[in-house]
Amino acid sequence: MLKPTLKALLLIGTVLLTSLSSPLVSAKGVYQSGPDFIAEAFNQPPNKATLWLTNDIREQAAEILGHPLAGLRVRYHQLDNKTAWILEEIGKEMPITIGVVVAEGKIEQVKILAYRESRGGEVRYPAYTRQYLGASLTHNNNLDQSIDGITGATLSVWAVNKVAALALYYHGQVINSRDPS
């Protein structure tokens, strides 16, 4: 039977410690606060507002999400025709907090603010979220752009897609309901 040397044990320990502390092993984290996201999205303080979820809005939101919607209202920030939404959707098991900025009916920014799953956190990287830039809604409330998936993060990708479409839908409701005077 071979005796492990101290050098071999240290090497094994170092490899284990490095792999356990790797950001790829655990994607969990809060990456930006809601107030910081809002401040970054606007060049001056926006107005805080509330979208009340009527039965029609609730029905369309449930269709976009693929499940019933909880709550009576959604809070958002707006400056002129630009809105910012901080929404949550379940990835595999835990909620993902996502910030979406919409201007003129197109996505200007998607950012993962908090990720709570143990896997699939690659959705937080700009290389992934840039795919949403310029996306708008089709007539049946789908994104008009194809979004590439990430192996091992399918449910997280679906969650971000749903939130992006929902933010676009909510933006349309807010902009279309404004008094034209």
Image (spheres, rainbow, N blue to C red):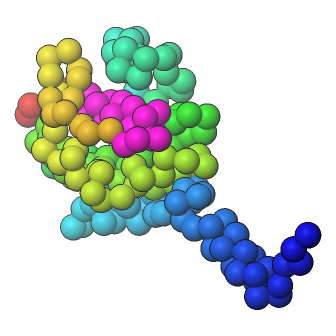
- Tally of numbered discs: 0
Examine the residues drawn in magenta and state their main secondary structure. Answer: helix
Residue 111 appearing in the image? yes
Q: Looking at this rendering, what residue extends furthest in the bottom direction?
A: 7
Residue 44 falls left or right of residue 97: left
Q: Is residue 112 above or below residue 16?
A: above
Quarter-of-image position of residue 81: top left
Residue 167 falls left or right of residue 2: left
Q: Which of these two is toward me, 6 or 77? A: 6
Span shown in magenta: 150-171
The quadrant of the image that shows the C terminus is top left
Q: Residue at x 37, y 43 (%)?
A: 150
Where is residue 105? Give x, y as percent: 14, 37
Q: Is residue 177 magenta?
A: no
Where is residue 1? Give x, y as percent: 91, 70
Q: Residue at x 89, y 78 (%)?
A: 3
Where is residue 66? Give x, y as percent: 43, 17
Q: Residue at x 42, y 53 (%)?
A: 122
Residue 76 falls left or right of residue 141: right
